[in-house]
Image: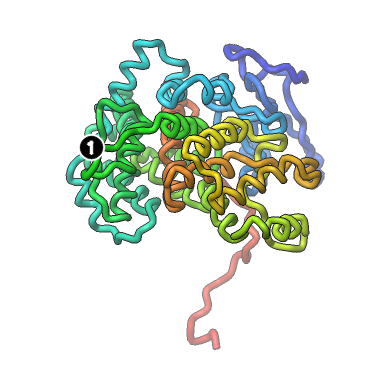
Amino acid sequence: MTDTPTQADAPATAPEDTVTLTDNATGRTYTLPVLHGTTGPRVIDIRKLYAETGMFTYDPGFTSTGSCESKITYIDGDKGILLHRGFPIEELAEHGDFMEVAYLLLNGELPSRNEKYDFEQIMTRHSMVHEQLTFFYRGFRRDAHPMAILCGITGALSAFYGDSLDINDPQQRMIASHRLISKMPTIAAMAYKYSCGQPFVYPRNDLRYAENFLHMMFAVPTEPYRVNQVLARAMDRIFILHADHEQNASTSSVRLSGSTGANPFACIAAGIASLWGPAHGGANEAVLQMLEQIGRKERIPEFIKRAKDKNDPFRLMGFGHRVYKNHDPRAQVLRRTCHEVLGELGIRHEPLLDIAIELERIALEDEFFVDRKLYPNVDFYSGIILRAMGFPTSMFTVLFALARTVGWISQWKEMIEDRDQRIGRPRQLYTGPTSRHYVPLSMRG
């Protein structure tokens, strides 16, 4: 076998690319084909494994399982590489904007000037939500978590936009995709406004995507709101850097839900629910909670010592990454953005930000962190930026969901159009009791 990747238009496998498995219990051998992507690890095709051997594979968390074929996002965690449709995330974040990246994820190519203009016009025209949805918000408690509201409202969209629920109609799929991407900032901002008792702010057609979101978040009827372009650019970069990240837990939830034929609004609501978990989308919120726990800059050495003690349950949040074993390419972009935002806002001595900056310095210089490649990740910097911009901690995961919606929709669309897709149905290694017989209650003592 060869490690050379095939070209995009070449067959996924060749007859000589196989692996042989031996069942020591029976002495039988089985030959399985090996598939090649355009880059990345080779993949053993086990689709016929159960039929031919009567055995399943066992892979808790599916960390060694390729659940689908995809052309959208590629990650090499060992080298710190993240590509969207082949484009490095650093280039997209530095030179592009979120609407370009959204178009790229959905359609496979960067838009021309005219295509981008038309796409932005569509996003603008779809940004308002049905007025009756404003009454839906009133059913929530004022202190409800914004993610609970976002999940509920997103699922309810299917009751308001019934003309885009037929997943077998390409036109309806496209309309539903546009609606979800364009309405998510409006729904998210309304969730925030409801939680703090302020009136909803409607979207404006003269503002761009990130500008419009900041306007809906922070404008009030009593005075004009002027969008700060440095903050708008930072917001746009945060959206880009969170737009998609391959087959993570929330994306897999969207695909699994979509494999049943569920409507796109329900599938995205499933993704939001999955993202809400603190091990997934709640990581940047956990960073701020950690900074609050440290409390003062003078206490940092104490917590650094605890982080180095393997017997101490305390962990520094926002350092290292499950996938990236070298560095998080998104963090490098956000690090520069973080300092731009702090400089623009004139923030020099805000306690939690002082702690964060000192932790960053230590992580980049201390041998313990450098040797273990525990560099600050995207969650570390995004939490600092959002805090500085005035977002409450409860909104952090909401912003993640807002940005990730375009990735979820792109993955859902790709899955629907994949002729090989089937309903998701993982199997299990059963370790419970074997066959038993019912004993009448009167005989059970």
| Residue 370 x %, y % | 77, 41
218 or 73, nearer to the observer: 218
In which quadrant of the rendered view does residue 304 lie? Answer: bottom right
Q: Residue at x 42, y 36 (%)?
A: 405
Q: Residue at x 62, y 43 (%)?
A: 62
Graded by Cα atoms within 10 Å as few (under 14), some (14 to 19) or many (20 or more), the crowding at tag 1 reads few
Q: Residue at x 75, y 29 (%)?
A: 19
For residue 12, side relative to residue 124 (left or right): right
Instruction: Say if residue 313 shows up in the picture.
Output: yes
- Residue placed furthest toward the bottom: 445
- Quarter of the image for the N terminus: give it: top right
| Residue 250 x %, y % | 49, 43
Q: How many marks?
A: 1
- Quarter of the image for the C terminus: give it: bottom right
In which quadrant of the rendered view does residue 91 lie? Answer: top right
439 or 188, nearer to the observer: 188
| Residue 172 x %, y % | 29, 27
- Residue placed furthest toward the left: 132
In which quadrant of the rendered view does residue 271 lie? Answer: top left
Q: What residue type is disc 1 on? A: Gly
The residue wearing badge 1 is 162
Q: Tell me: residue 178, above or below residue 279.
A: above
Q: Secondary structure at mark 1?
A: helix
Instruction: Say if residue 246 shows up in the picture.
Output: no
| Residue 285 x %, y % | 52, 51
Q: Residue at x 25, y 31 (%)?
A: 204
Q: Tell me: residue 417, above or below residue 184.
A: above
For residue 218, side relative to residue 333 (left or right): left
Question: How is the protein colored in the picture?
Answer: rainbow
347 or 146, nearer to the observer: 347
